[in-house]
Image (spheres, helix red, strand yellow):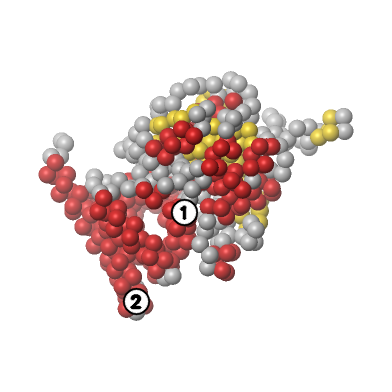
Amino acid sequence: MPKSGEEERYVSESSAEAVVDAASAAVASAAEAGAGWRRATGIAGAAIGVVAAGAAAGVAIERLTVGRGMRKKARLALDSAGPYGALRGTPGKAYADDGTELYYEVDDVEPEGGPAPRRRRLFGRKAPAPVTVVFSHGYCLSQDSWHFQRAALRGVVRTVHWDQRSHGRSQRGVAQVRDREAVTIEQLGRDLKAVIDAAVPDGPIVLVGHSMGGMTVMALADQYPELIRDRVVAVALIGTSSGRLGEVNFGLPVAGVNAVRRVLPGVLKALGQQAALVEKGRRATADLFTGVIKRYSFASRDVDPAVARFAERMIEGTPIDVVAEYYPAFSDHDKTAALAHFAGLPVLVLAGVGDLVTPSEHSEAIADLLPDAELVLVPDAGHLVMLEHPEVVTDRLADLLTRAGAVPAGATVGGYGSTSSTAQPG
């Protein structure tokens, strides 16, 4: 039976209070670290509570009614049964300009009946290198976030999947650990260039980026326009933004947004300096924050629980000090001018209508500057649209690859025809 407005308000308020209480309890375990740390964690509890108050309505109900032991058993069952993130390719390493080791994997196209043969020489020349699709993931995720698209493209086109610095299997950023430097989007663009130099030294490239990965692609274009001009044959920008991220309200009321913007940078810096203690707090409150993670990752109510748990594991696996050192980069990000380097290329701009992290209006703004781009707005989809509605993202990528000549027209990509024009989730 649908709840009345009064009941919904009560649930929202109760959920928010529960999250705030849990956050305060979690950080209280750090009390022995001293008064300064207690002040920082108190602020952290307040900031987390503000975010939770806006996110908790409707999604924290099960956290309040289902026992912790049962939830733990469910997580273990999902972790053991879920195949997501299990795909692996040929590993490789690239090195950023500060020495950070960047991990990537290559999925090569293999002919039927065995491994790929050595590249033949025709009249003294090498055969043309195949098109390679390079996938860049988002903030607090890893290359595994492309699980469904990777599975669909295997055997059809050569792909490269890499982990951004301090994410996944890549090394913690040397400049961040050694020099205490914050990460910049420009640095990520140079990191992507290092991966391309190592994994795709020649041949045409299709660039695909989600969220921070899309910003990374823009930073690459801004710093290496000749690479875009000479080698890039198509671009996909998914759930991303070219700038003005400081205006995003994350679905919160005005007062909550202002409070978060005011205290969050300082809070994250303080928490990043006490990473070990904070990680204990994160583990203690994992049950309650699962609802918040789900709220900001997905928009539909019927997400596969194993997929939701998979996303949760990636986000939880990002250390708090990494979260902190990346955060300032987003408010400084402005690569609007760099979009001009994609003019004339086949471009896909795709976003979930219910994205609270990089709202679909940001994708519309990108498409306005690239009038020849295909703009796809996916209803009932949130920030992790490639996990929530993988069939839509894969379908549109297949079409983009066809337009770029990466796959033949009519080819089947993981069950999706490469000439389909549908943009609605099935």
Percent x, y of residue 354 = 35, 38
Position of 30 compared to 421: left or right?
Answer: left
Report the number of numbered marks: 2
Residue that sits furthest to the right in the current view? 124
Give the spatial CA distance, label 2 vs label 1: 29 Å
The quadrant of the picture occupied by the N terminus is top left
Q: Is residue 412 above or below residue 39?
A: above
Residue found 78% across the figure and 32% down from its top: 127
Which corner quadrant of the image does residue 414 belong to? Answer: top right
Position of 240 compared to 227: left or right?
Answer: left
**Three-letter residue code for mark 1:** Asp
The kind of secondary structure element at disc 2 is: helix
Residue found 38% across the figure and 46% down from its top: 357
**Three-letter residue code for mark 2:** Gly
Pointer 2: what residue?
Answer: 36
Pointer 1: what residue?
Answer: 332
Residue found 61% across the figure and 36% down from its top: 206
Position of 54 compared to 169: left or right?
Answer: left
Q: Earlier in the sequence, mark 2 or mark 1?
A: 2
Q: Is residue 407 above or below residue 253?
A: above
